[in-house]
Structure formats: C-alpha cells, structure tokens
Amino acid sequence: MQFQILKLVLWPRGDFDPRVIEFAPGKVNVISGASKTGKSAVIPIIDYCLCSNKCAIPVGTIRESCEWFGVVISTVEGEKLLARREPGDQKQTGDMYFAEGETVKIPHRIEAKNSNTDQVRALLNRLSGLSNLGMDPNSEGYSGDRTSFRDLMAFTFQPQNIIANPDVLFFKADTTEHREKLKAIFPYVLNAITQETLAARWELERLERLLRQREAALSDVNSAVRVWMSEAEVWLQQGREFGLIQSDTPPPSEWLEMLGALRTLSQSNYRAARPTMTTIEATIAELEGLRSLESDESATLSRLRQRLMEISRLLESSKSYGSALHIQRDRLAISDWLRQLGQEGRAPLEAIAPEGKDHLDKLCEALDGLELEIRSRTTVSDKMDKERHRLRAQAEESLARLGALRAQIADLERRSEAARAEIYRADQVERYLGRLEQALKLYGRSGEDSELRGEVEALKGKISPLRAIISEQLIRQVMQSSLATIENIAGQIIPKLDAEWPDAPIKIVVPDLTIKVVQGTRDDYLWEIGSGANWLAYHVSVSLALQRFFLKTPAHPVPGFLIYDQPSQVYFPKGVHSEEVDEGEWRDEDIEAVRKVFAAVSAETILAEGRLQVVLLDHAAQEVWNGIDNIHLVDEWRGSEKLVPLEWMASTGSRS
C-alpha cells in the first residue's frame, strides 16, 4: 500500500507558527536526540492522527502546549492532511480536520473541525483496499469483525516498550483485544485468505443456511409423502365407497398404477358420485324450491310487519294531536253565537268587539278554520285506520302461507332421510377430493423433478465450487508457505544484526504471536532466550521481513512504513548520548551493533526501491550511522531543540 509519512505537524495553543517536521519518502528518516526531548511521542502522535481509539500522547508539556496534532501522508490519490484535536481531560476526541490535494498546504491555525474519526477511518480503510466483510460470518467478537486499517498498525509501529520485548512481538499485542484480533486477521495479512475467499465464505454461509432450510422443508415433505404412499390403498378404497370408482374395476398393484388412478380420481366431479335416483333428485329439487318460497314469504311478511308498525305509530301521534284540537274547539265553539249577537245588534257585542262588526267577522273566520282542521284530521285518521286493517289482513294471509310452507318443508324432510344423507355425503366427497388433490400436490413437490428438489440441487451446485475456494487445507498450505517465505527473509536479515545465533532458523508462531529459534533439536520461544540484543535482532528482522513480503504482493493493505523507537536502548546507557559520554563508555562493539541495525534497515529501504519508508528515533548521534546509504537526518533534538519549541512551553507555563 502506498502510504508514507511526509510531515508531522503540531499546532500550538498560542499565536505561534505550527511546528512542521518533514520526512523523506523511501528513506530511513532519523530523529536523533537526548532523553525527554519528545522522541517517544512521535509514534503516539502519528497513531493518534491515524484514528486510534485513545490518545497515548504523553501528558504534560506536549499536550499542554499543543491544540492540534497532524500528519501529512502520501497516497496514490495525492497528499492528505489528517489532524486531530488534543482531547484535554478526555481519553480521546473524534474531532478531526481533513484536507487533500496534489500538495497539501498546512494551515496556520485550525479554527474548527471539518471531519471526524469515523469518516477518516472509512477513508483509510478505502485507501488500504480492505474487504468490508468480516473474517468469519458465523462468529462474533474478534474473529467475526472485518479487518480494518487500525489492525494493520501492529506491523508498522515498534515503540520503545515493544522493540526489545521478549513477550510481545507486535504493537499493542500486549492487550487481549488486539492480540485476539491480530491472530484472527493474520491469514488475511499473509494472503492465505483473500477478498475472494472472504466473499466466498459469506456467500457459502448464506447458501448453506438456505440449503438447510430447503432440505428441512424437503425432509418434511418426504416424510408426509411416505405416510401418504402407505395409505394409497385406503384412498382408493374410500373413492370406491363414494362411488367415484366403478365397483368392478380391479385395484392396481404397482405404485405407479396407484398414482395414476389417484390422479384420475382427483379430477372426478363429486356430483358424479351421487346415485341416479329420480325420487331423491325430485325431492331435493322440491325442497330447494320450498326453501326459496319460504325465504321470499318471510321477506314479504317482514315488510308488512314493518309497515304496520309505522302506521300504528302514526295513528298514535294523530290521535294525540286530534285530542288537543278537540279541546281547543270545545273551548272556542262560540263563533255561531257571536254571529247571532251581531245580527241582532245587541249591546253586549260592543264590549266583545269594540272595533265593530268587521273585526268580529275576522274572529269568527279564524275559529271556523280551526273547526275545519279538526274535521280534516278526523278524515285522515279514518283513512289510516282503513290502511292498517288492510295491511293486517295481508300480514295474516302471508303468515298463513309461511306456516303452510314450513309445514311442507318439515314433512318433506321427515319423509326424505335419503335427501339429507345425500347432502351430507356430497360434502364428504368434496372434502375427500380436496384432501386428495393436496396430497398429490405434496407428492409432486417431493418428486425428482419437483421445484423444491431442484432448488436443493441448484444450491448444492453453487456450494461445491465455493467450498473449493475456501478449503481450510488450502488456507493452511498458503499460510505455511507465506510464513516460510517470511521466515526465510528474516533468516537473511538476522546475520546482519547482533544476534547470538545468526544462522539458527526461526519459526513464526501465529497462535502465540511470537517466534521460536530452532537450534538443533531445540525450539526456544523468544521469551526463553536471554539478552536484549537477541530480542532486538528478532524484532527488527521479523518486522523488516514482513514488510518485504507485503511489498511483493500487489496492493497489499499494510502501509509501507515502519517506525522504530530507541533500538539502541539495549546497548547505550539510558539518558546519555555521544556528546555526554567519556571516551570508552561506549564500547566499539556496542556502537557497531547499533550501526548494524541502521545498516539492515537501510538495506531494506534500498531493496524496496522507494516503496518502504522507515522512521528511526534514537539517542545515537550521526557518527553512529555515518556513511550508511539512504539515511536522511530529519532533526537533532538536543539542548534547547525539542519536539515542542521552548517558546510554546513558556507561553503555557509548561515544564521543560
């Protein structure tokens, strides 16, 4: 994977220019310096900017002085700037700043985030070309997770606590979570499992799950069919009893003949099974006719009863209203008397009608209208009484006819037990034919040419080539071949280093994530071997061998860079460098041993032809590696020169 670090950038909290440390691609980039200058913070800063789950940047000066950390990386898509905010009191923050282009310009300040760790992780996964599929579709936890760019950091970083550690060979493999995940993805990293293999695994799991479902369904069908086949003779006998098969037809003895007879039987019309008795047919027809007449007559009677109820309610209302009018008429029946008084010209008339005779006439006319309404109300009531009597007569006639029909039906049913039996028998035949049809369909589903069996065979046809792709034996063979290649490369590098047994071959033990050194009949684990020089030699040789193997695979997902922190720690006294030691404090053989590390690393970068970049952080001064090819001195941090400038510390009150 083309992925090398071009710049390491620190943005201060104060108004200062950002600190930019530039690296050369394809070379051994050396940062030399004394203790407490910030060398060991380089790996945590780069790891943090590459979206680690927590911030391992040392607390104190660096985190108090810096607001953002960033790296500029070179990829096949050009340069990309990945910057991440200092998390403060949190373990980490997802706030990130992202920029890309043919050449990225470093901003003077980062005012606000424009991305987050999830988005940048997705970008890194895409750049590495990793599969989106998990290692095992049937597993949960570490082995079931997909391989991510973050998992590959195990092969790129060798911090100070790892590079000469007898118990831990890979970055972060000292925690259970990372250790188990690394073991799970090792076959993928070693090309034993490819993207094609992962896709085949997931497709195989899907097809096998579908096959199990189809086979279970087919098994159920076959079980039901076997029971049904054993009962075939019973089905035929029942058809004979229902009259669907002629009594003189000989019973079939072979299964195919039985099947043919049953299929013919299933096409029978149940009405053909009825006996041809004219009397029964006539009875059934008459019964159906009487029931139809009964239904019609019941509807007629219901309508008549409804109208009678409506007329009765209307008459009750009319009577109540008429009674009220009669009372008013009795109270006001003086119109004739008043007219008579008016004709006679009697004096009392003036007291009743002071406005004269005309006013009296109007009063009398109003009283006449009331009497007319009363008379008309009486006429309407009489008409409604007549209608009620007529409807009552019709209802009584309908009720009589309905009673007669029901009597005929009851008599006919009593006299026609055969009719009732025939109806029941017809229902039985219909149910029998329905069950027979379903049983034949079930048998058809289980046949050699059935759809379900065809699905099962098709699934098996798809599964067979997938199993060949993901053959565990083939995976083991490729895994062993890849490990043998890496072990052979490491065997070429170890003699260049200060190892106690330079010619002893090694074995990489993936289940334990360590190595064994083969000495005759003995296989010794790394932790069983003494001396920090040996541990350092095997860490350097294995990490370089893995990178050479990765570079042989086109578009391998592991980034083409390595960072070593303090490889000289097993030789040089802690806290001293070449400017502070007396003559003879560093023995020539110790300096030569450290020089071998620089030379071996340089040789691998030259062999990689620019595709491998190494960053080497060490106390050793330039005199140690002077004259070795392809080494680029990035910076020397001694005295006042450190990772974080002194003016940043002064502005924030940090301790130097």
Image (cartoon, helix red, strand yellow):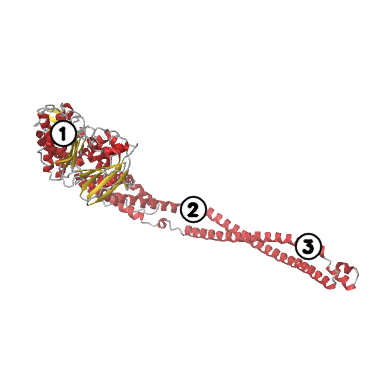
Please say if 273 is above or below 46. below
Give the numbered dot on residue 420. 2
Secondary element type, mark 3: helix
Give the numbered dot on residue 326. 3
Q: Is residue 236 left or right of residue 632?
A: right
- Amino acid carrying label 1: it is Ala
Q: Are marks 3 and 1 in contact (CB under 8 Å)?
A: no
Q: Nearer the viewer, residue 615 or 544?
A: 615
Q: Nearer the viewer, residue 50 or 625?
A: 625
User: How would you rate the neighbour count of disc 2 (Cα within 10 Å): few for under 14, some for 14-19, many for 20 or more?
Assistant: some
Q: Is residue 329 left or right of residue 493?
A: right
Q: CA distance from mark 3 to mark 1?
A: 134 Å
Q: CA distance from mark 1 to mark 2?
A: 113 Å
Q: Is residue 213 visible?
A: no
From the viewer's perspective, is the residue at label 3 or at label 1 nearer?
1
- Amino acid carrying label 2: it is Arg
Q: Is residue 376 left or right of residue 42?
A: right
Please say if 485 is above or below 433. above
Q: Nearer the viewer, residue 185 or 38?
A: 38
Residue 192's x, y, as percent? 18, 42
Residue at left 76%, top 60%?
A: 324
Residue 95's image quarter? top left
From the viewer's perspective, is the residue at label 2 or at label 3 nearer?
3
Q: Are marks 1 and 2 in contact (CB under 8 Å)?
A: no
Give the residue pinned by disc 1.
620
Residue 119's x, y, as percent? 30, 47
Secondary element type, mark 2: helix
Residue 254's x, y, as percent? 28, 49
Q: Where's the C terminus, which quadrant?
A: top left
Q: CA distance from mark 2 to mark 3?
A: 64 Å
